[in-house]
Image: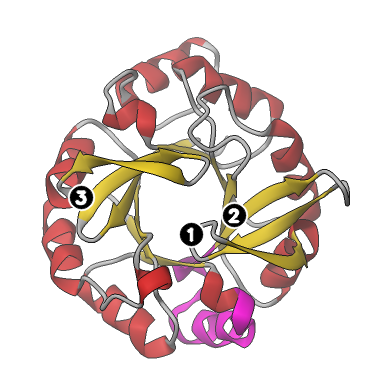
Amino acid sequence: MIKKRIIPCLDVKDGVVVKGIQFKGLREIGDPVELAKRYNALGADELVFLDISATQTGNALMLDVISKTAKELFIPMTIGGGLKSIEDISAVLNAGADKVSLNSAALSNPDLINETSEKFGAQCICIAIDAKWDEDKQDWFCYTHGGKQRTDIRTIDWIKEVERRGAGELLVTSMDYDGMQQGFDHKLLSIIQKAVTIPIIASGGAGSAEDFISLFLETDVSAGLAASIFHDQDVSIQQVKDLCDSKGVPVRHV
């Protein structure tokens, strides 16, 4: 049985790790390199590092921070935010990232998925999906620019297309559940997992170790990602893994 992954996420704005609720009200958490070192030592399976200011403001890639972080890690690191070209992605991978996360750039230029998958391999290309429910249209739609801009692209249509184009993984964030700490959006995740065959990282809503158990028992996603509960040390990665063990959910141990 494939082991489930527990992944902390570092949302970085202007070089500082931040966290908000439903993509709003950001508060400062700390230094990304120091937090990455801590999570590496605490048994995280991977680390996702999203520069949420880059897409909105066009900030230069923080290659120095990425390089410093990569030197402190012995686990895979995914980098996203402001990546718009093969050159951007190549620079990030060369700085020490194992994978890249694409959202806004992929939606505006879907061919980028094909090109990068062919050049770097599908295993390096993770497509981030920021999905929000539209009550009027009774469907989920994709958002870009750190959740600031709504598109007319239906989430389910988009995830099918990115798989066809060669994406190796999806990072699905439920904007409605983000930061609410009331559990993951099982309905959205269940629909997505039935539509594609590539691995899915679930994001948005984790509030307890039990939320990961529910996620893994009620959906077939490959990984659960969280920020607030790990940053605030309300729940440790080890606590999540210990509970997974007790419930028969396979996880890795350092």
Looking at this view, name the residue that lies furthest to the right: 137
For image coordinates 16% across by 57% down, the residue present is 69
Q: For the residues marked 2 and 1, what is the alpha-carbon distance in whole angstroms?
A: 8 Å
Q: Is residue 43 left or right of residue 182?
A: left
* Front position among marks 2 and 1: 1
Q: Secondary structure at mark 3?
A: loop
Q: Nearer the viewer, residue 132 or 99?
A: 132
- Location of residue 192 with respect to 29 vertically, above or below: below
Label 2 close to label 1 by CB (< 8 Å): yes
Of the image marks 3 and 2, the number of the one nearer the N terminus: 3
* Front position among marks 3 and 2: 2
Q: Is residue 124 left or right of residue 34?
A: right
Tell me the amino acid under the disc marked 1. Answer: Gly
Instruction: Report which quarter residue 79 is drawn in.
Output: bottom left
Report which residue position mark 2 lands on.
130
Magenta part of the protein: which range?
107-127
Q: Secondary structure at mark 2?
A: strand
Q: For the residues marked 3 and 2, what is the alpha-carbon distance in whole angstroms?
A: 28 Å
Report which residue position mark 3 lands on.
74
Residue 11 percent location from the top left of the image:
34, 50
Quarter holding the N terminus is: top right
